[in-house]
Image (spheres, coloured by chain):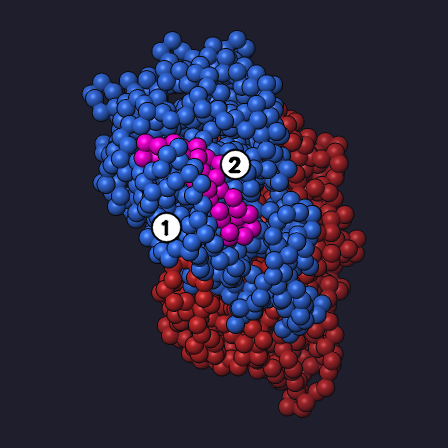
Chain colours: A red, B blue
Amino acid sequence: MNTNAQHPAALTPKSKFRPLAVNQVRVGGFFGPRIDVIATKTAALLFDRCVEAGMLEQIDPDKPSPGIVIPYHPGGKVTTQMFWDSDLAKSIETAAYALYRQRDAALEARIDAVIDTYGRLQAEDGYLNSFFLRIEPGTRWANLRDQHELYDAGHMIEAAVAYYQATGKRKFLDMLCRYADLIDRTFGPNADQKHGYPGHPELELALIKLGRVTGEQRYLDLAKFFVDARGQEPHYFDQEAVARGEKPEDFHFKNYEYAQAHKPVREQREIVGHAVRAAYLYAGMADVATEFSDPSLDPALEAIWSHLTEKNLYVTGGFGPSKDNEGLTYDYDLPNATAYAETCASVALVFWASRMLGRAPDARFADVMERALYNGALTGISEDGTHFFYDNPLESRGAHHRWRWHFCPCCPPNIARLVTSIGTYFYGVAEDEVAVHLYCENDAELEVAGTRLNLGLTTRYPDDGSIALTLDPERPVDFTLSLRVPGWAKGFSLAINGEPLVAQPENGYLRIRRQWNAGDRVALELTMEAELLYAHPKVAPDQGRAAILRGPFVYCVEETDNTAALNSYVIKDGVRMTPSDIDGLPGAVGLSLDALFESQPAEGLYAESPPERRPASLKAIPYYLWDNRAPGEMLVWLRREP
Amino acid sequence: MNTNAQHPAALTPKSKFRPLAVNQVRVGGFFGPRIDVIATKTAALLFDRCVEAGMLEQIDPDKPSPGIVIPYHPGGKVTTQMFWDSDLAKSIETAAYALYRQRDAALEARIDAVIDTYGRLQAEDGYLNSFFLRIEPGTRWANLRDQHELYDAGHMIEAAVAYYQATGKRKFLDMLCRYADLIDRTFGPNADQKHGYPGHPELELALIKLGRVTGEQRYLDLAKFFVDARGQEPHYFDQEAVARGEKPEDFHFKNYEYAQAHKPVREQREIVGHAVRAAYLYAGMADVATEFSDPSLDPALEAIWSHLTEKNLYVTGGFGPSKDNEGLTYDYDLPNATAYAETCASVALVFWASRMLGRAPDARFADVMERALYNGALTGISEDGTHFFYDNPLESRGAHHRWRWHFCPCCPPNIARLVTSIGTYFYGVAEDEVAVHLYCENDAELEVAGTRLNLGLTTRYPDDGSIALTLDPERPVDFTLSLRVPGWAKGFSLAINGEPLVAQPENGYLRIRRQWNAGDRVALELTMEAELLYAHPKVAPDQGRAAILRGPFVYCVEETDNTAALNSYVIKDGVRMTPSDIDGLPGAVGLSLDALFESQPAEGLYAESPPERRPASLKAIPYYLWDNRAPGEMLVWLRREP
């Protein structure tokens, strides 16, 4: 295990749960092979496709500027070059985690070359954005609302932190610190500074990472400034529009809800606008709340969280139903076949939820994190690591498939970096508490209550609910071990060193405070049974339907295991569901269940007689696995009757 | 009854069923009051809104050109000015029918003024298009694919024919004949002519009307040329794109299926592309097939008709589910909440279906015409004649309402002109046959077998199925009276002069050949009962659902008569449906039926227990009447169980 870069200086240690660095957790179990696929295949492939898109021409100051490259796209002629830095950065971040997993000299050399190119590109004053240095020079900081400039900076910072942690090399991190210092000088509350903030949030959470890894308080302060400044009047986006000679009211999305800048963040109570922007912002807000122990953000964060999870979240942990704004529309608007539910939005929800755990374990957040991770996010990448979903409907007529690449390639590296860094989401570590949020086989090295602790977790989760932990502190130590009891678990049992322990979850966590000694063993048994879920009556498309849940997985039915049309099947409430193998997907847990199959006599498009019914059986598979075999229909919400 | 303009010279009289002119049918019954609303209110209102939009500035050569006017629209910045001539023309056409209904000096003066303005605008050579004369001069005939130039000409011709028939005034008709003559000189098969054709079909059917009213064969020939030339290689749209300096492959809609020009029309077998273009084209093709007794068009027309009605038609007679291309997507793609199903498409389907009846009575066509008319088309206008639907979903969460006006105002005058001219769709008259396609109280004056015939039809249809006809030929005459037995009728009985007559429908029509004498009475009794319809298994969103049909009307449930959420109701197959009054919509027939109402205990967005059920009742109303009262949810396809 590479320990060069771990254990950054803790800034304010008390009551702040922070994630472990990727190099502190060696992941096996469910995610291990998935990380390996990405490390050995996807990481290099992401670079290949960035190169194919022409990104290296854009960033290289020694080559002629490619100018605006407009790919053909049915939605109109747009360029995504303004966020190419972020796509490259997320690819570097993925590769960094891949290198930590498995050192690969060729991949490392490619990254170093890109970093060197960025090094040559970086301006004297530290500015580092290829679009504004090479494609549209002279328009720096002119349109924060639309142009993704600060968003790019955030992703590059995250990449630099990851590469530093994975390899111990400081060059990229130092470059990004210089850029962050420029941003810190440029933006801020003083009269001689710009009072702007990212149109697409992301930089906020990146600055928190940068502050944590460097120990520099000013990066945390800058994150807080961006959070505090957002949506204040006079409105910065109005001012910069006027400065550009534009009318603020000509903004394509009409009002600043699109970017969650319609009012100061502390006054916001509902999730609105572009889904990814929203979750990145709230993640940054939650980080700020943690690092500054700032309860003034809580009413907004809590209300927005509730508004998402109680009225606007797909059962898969996806959100943002509309393609038009890539985001939210109105409460309970959760169409299935046309769900946008961008992969990046579920990834971002994992980010946000994980940061809501910054001050205390709370299963409200961890349950949603898990649901989004195993479903809405994980479906974004094919099992072989080569193809990617951008939008994620819950029903398909058979024409929806993962892309080799997308003209707006934000999702592929986003899901790839999430999976390769998944170990950092397993634990939250405070001064004298270790919370286990997600269960997956792993070995972790951390420090709690001033004591080094090796923690080994063995489990087949999420295929079953048996979890075994071994704790090896370097010396006996008092701290609280908090174990999440997922909301889906119908029961649980706990034992320490073989002795049953009766405990009640507190906010969904069993909080075990005791002296821990080397070799202590904790066994947690979670009752995992397949069950049906029913949607609120206001979710119109799901009425008369049920979704299948088993553990963290939402299930779907696919044409390849069944008979089309999938909407011809009806299941009965209380149907028995039996775990079974899945053809072509070894190791995954399918479910078999009885159903009725309706068929219509051939009477044309609209018949006067009702369909006939015959007994049939259905095979369901975890949603994230769909479209890995023969193409065809897919359905999450099955027709049901009492 | 104004008879100045009726009975144009019959060009080729035998076996060609032609519609009556609007001034040959005096409409009462169901449509009478609707025509009156449009005549006394909507006709003037359409003008008002055209004026508000600035159309009169565009067409007036004595005013400064307004240039491109770009209204704000969430879909982007586009101008609809290129088809403003068509909007004004359809408003004139509506007003013409209104004047026939009820002479109105003020309205007539407004139309005359517009016609005078167009008279001043018309170029020396006959060219008459305000966009290309005033807004983008010098680009005449440069982009038939996109620019609606010939489409505008078609609508102006239709307006001129209508105004001539209604008022006997020839000025507008003569102007349009000059324009048609220019088009006839410009386009054609000769080497010195352009081989192009309308990107948006419409002119074809208009030229047939013009040929019929003027007796000029060359207009029919020109219509045939446009039909024959369409989609031939080398492709005209490619050639004109190259001539403009564009790449043909940059066409926004990728291929010419959008405009049904992807192959010669006789080779086409499926309905594709933009819905309104499609139906206008096929209407023109059917007209050509009739006028030229050309069976070579039949395989295409028959196959396309089947492809629409067997795989792509909403139960309401709407089609074209997608907003993206305002048209077709793939077979059985009939989403309800997001149905585009433009009002104009249903109107165009009435046009097309009526023309499919040009060579023989066939209930396949008349049934669809009726369904589209009473549902997908008629819903396009509010009961008070002031607000208009553009797109027509079959399910609404409550936010879909008729517009006061639309930035693309094609639908309001289209439904208005259809309703005010509805009498022309009732009958098809051939040399020795009169077919009755639609039943509505009316008095008609026509000529059959060389004999003038007054025909009186009394009925409460579509509220009930009793129909009484009185025939008054000027002398005893042999001809066939063909009476449609609608596909929905579960039974029928026929009597002539009180004597029961046993007859079997032939292609859905009772064809009664005999000598008819003055005062002959025919009584047709159609069994009209409410019934449920079930959609083909491949129509995914409608599985587990049923639609209610009674006579020509598809029914829906509205929140105002029931309790939201409407998807919480379940009906049983075979449910008894009882006619009942509708609150706030006197005279219309509602239906009351038993149902079950499901409610979920308040457990958040996704509950683990199935909903509870209680007995309830539902009130359904004809679909076309929805959104005339309190706003709220609406649903056509109700959840059902055996």
Expressed as whole percent of the image width and height from the top left, the position of residue A369 reads 61, 64
- Element marked by disc 1: strand
Q: Nearer the viewer, residue A161 or A305?
A: A305
Residue B431 x/y as whole percent: 30, 36
The residue lying toward the viewer, choosing from A16 and B443, is: B443
Residue A349, disc: none
Residue farthest right in this picture = A296
Q: Is residue B502 magenta?
A: no
Q: Is residue B14 visible?
A: yes
How far from the left and from the top, in percent, is residue B164?
45, 21
Would residue A28 be visible to someone looking at this image? no
Give the residue displayed 37% in from the left and 46% down from the top: B482
Q: Which chain contains the residue that carries disc 1?
A: B
Q: Residues within 10 Å of mark 2 (few under 14, many from 20)?
A: many
- For disc 2, the marked residue is B27
Q: Residue furthest bottom?
A: A499
Q: Residue at x 20, y 20 (%)?
A: B191
Dot 1: few (<14), some (14–19), or many (≥20) neighbours within 10 Å? many
Q: Which label number is shown at residue B509?
A: 1
Give the residue drawn at x 51%, y 74%. Answer: A571
Query: B87 above or below A102?
Result: above
Q: Residue at x 74, y 80 (%)?
A: A504
**Left or right of B32: which side holds A396?**
left
Q: Main secondary structure of the magenta part?
A: strand
As shown in the figure, which amino acid type bears the numbered disc 1? Tyr
The answer to which of marks 1 and 2 sits earlier in the sequence is 2
Could you say which is closer to the camera, residue B366 or residue A73?
B366
Q: Position of residue A74 (x, y in %)?
A: 42, 41
Q: Chain of mark 2?
A: B
Image height of A595 relative to A202, above or below: below
What span is colored magenta in the figure? Answer: B443-471
